[in-house]
Structures are given as structure tokens and as C-alpha cells.
Amino acid sequence: MIIAIDGPAGAGKSTVARRVADELGVDYLDTGAMYRAATFGVLAREIDPADAHAVIKVCGQLELDVGVDRVVVDGVDATSAIRGPKVTSAVSSVAANPQVRSILVELQRAWVRNRGAGVVEGRDITTVVLPDADLKLFVTASPRVRAERRVAESGGDVDAVEASIAERDRRDETREASPLSISSEAVVIDTSEMSIDDVVADILLRVQG
Ligand code: DC
């Protein structure tokens, strides 16, 4: 079974996707980590993330190894750095590059082909990468709740975090290449008032169909 999960930043999709994959005994792919890994590679080579041509060239050369617990870029362990502020502020512009997207989408489809089953999570999985997935989900929560969760995890000011989440949503939703949007075939799960356990249980029920 192939499960595709999309949704905005901070809606809890990674945690949920990972738990669902564990419960089903299948692999999990975090495609956001792939865009982050590519961005790490671009910054490591001192390329301006806004320089589309240079970014495409670098992305075609990068060796990306995106595992569940470890991300390696050109032999360098980038697991922590891909979550850091430098990568986080540059990733939207790398992810907006259509050629970068086609390179990564191809890797994502190959990942699925090689396994025949799995949980794949991102922004365009239900709409572009795997529109024929067996189960398509859009996991979301209000910007306020997403900000509160992020602050509980890593500190900061809720208002400021909410503003930056709203700004990242806006960039992800309005970019030309594969903007974040809800597939008409996706089941929408609003996790604002749900625990992670509730969301996982809800998805497992849908898997059993
Ligand atoms: O889920 P995340 O915050 O780790 O995603 C990082 C960035 O990558 C975010 O700006 C959205 C983008 N992204 C994307 O454009 N397409 C995907 N399939 C996954 C992530």
C-alpha cells in the first residue's frame, strides 16, 4: 500500500507519517528533508539559492542520501544542519525551482518503485508525485496551533512563529511550480484539536478501509 500525505509546515505530518509507517511495517520518506538536503548542498558550495541556473547545476551533481534518521549530502552528515536556520530560510527558494523539483520528484518516484509500498510525505505528493497512491491525505492545523506546537518543541515567541509559518505557507501556496494545494481526491484531516495518537488511529482505520 502506498500512502501519500501532504500538508503545511508544522501540522504534525512528519510525526504522523513516521508512526503510520512503523505501524504498517513499511518505509517512510520525508520529501521536505530532500529539499532541505539539496539546499544544504547548495549552501555548502556557496551558491546563492536565488541563482536558479547555478542551483540546478549543483542539484544535478549532489549525492543525496535521505534516510529516516540520517541525511547525508556528498558524504557529509547533514542531519542536524538541514533543520537549522540557514537551510530553513533558503529552502523555499530552492524548492520553487521547477528543474530542482523534477530531479527530486524522479528520485521520490524511484523510491516508491523500488519498494512497492511506503508512506511518502510532503507538499505535492497527492497532486504531482503520486496521484495514484492508494490513500491520499491532507493533514493540516490552524496557523496558531502549528505555532504553539513549534514553540512547545523548540521555544520562541508564539506570535513571531505564527507570522513566520503564515509567511512560509504563503510562499509554498503561491509559487508557480507545484504549489501546495489540496487534491480533490485527498481526505482532509484537521489536527488542530486532535492528538497525534488520534490522527494515527484515524489514518490506520482508513487504511483498513
Ligand atoms: O516539510 P519541510 O518544512 O521540511 O519542507 C521544507 C521545504 O520544502 C518547504 O519550504 C516546502 C518544501 N517542500 C516542497 O516544496 N515539496 C515537498 N514535497 C516537500 C517540501
Image (cartoon, rainbow, N blue to C red):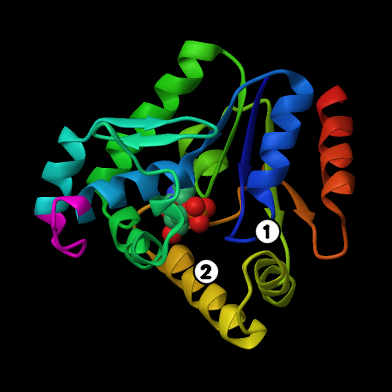
The residue depicted at 63 percent of the width and 45 percent of the height is: 14
Given residues 94 and 178, the one toward you in this image is 94
Q: Amino acid at mark 1?
A: Ala
Q: Quadrant of the N terminus?
A: top right
The picture places residue 117, in percent across and down from the top left corner, at 61, 17
Instruction: Say whether residue 202 is left or right of residue 88.
Output: right
Residue plotted at (37% across, 44% down): 78
Q: Residue at 72% across / 69% down in the picture?
A: 152
Residue 15 versus residue 134: which sits nearer the camera?
A: 15
- Is residue 67 rendered magenta in the image? no
* Residue 18 in view, yes or no: yes
The answer to whether residue 136 is seen in the rendering is no
Going from the N terminus, do you reach mark 2 or mark 1 first?
1
Tell me the number on the disc at residue 169.
Answer: 2
Looking at the rendering, the stretch of residues picked out in magenta corresponds to 44-53
Vertical arrangement, residue 139 with respect to residue 60, above or below: below
Residue hosting label 1: 11
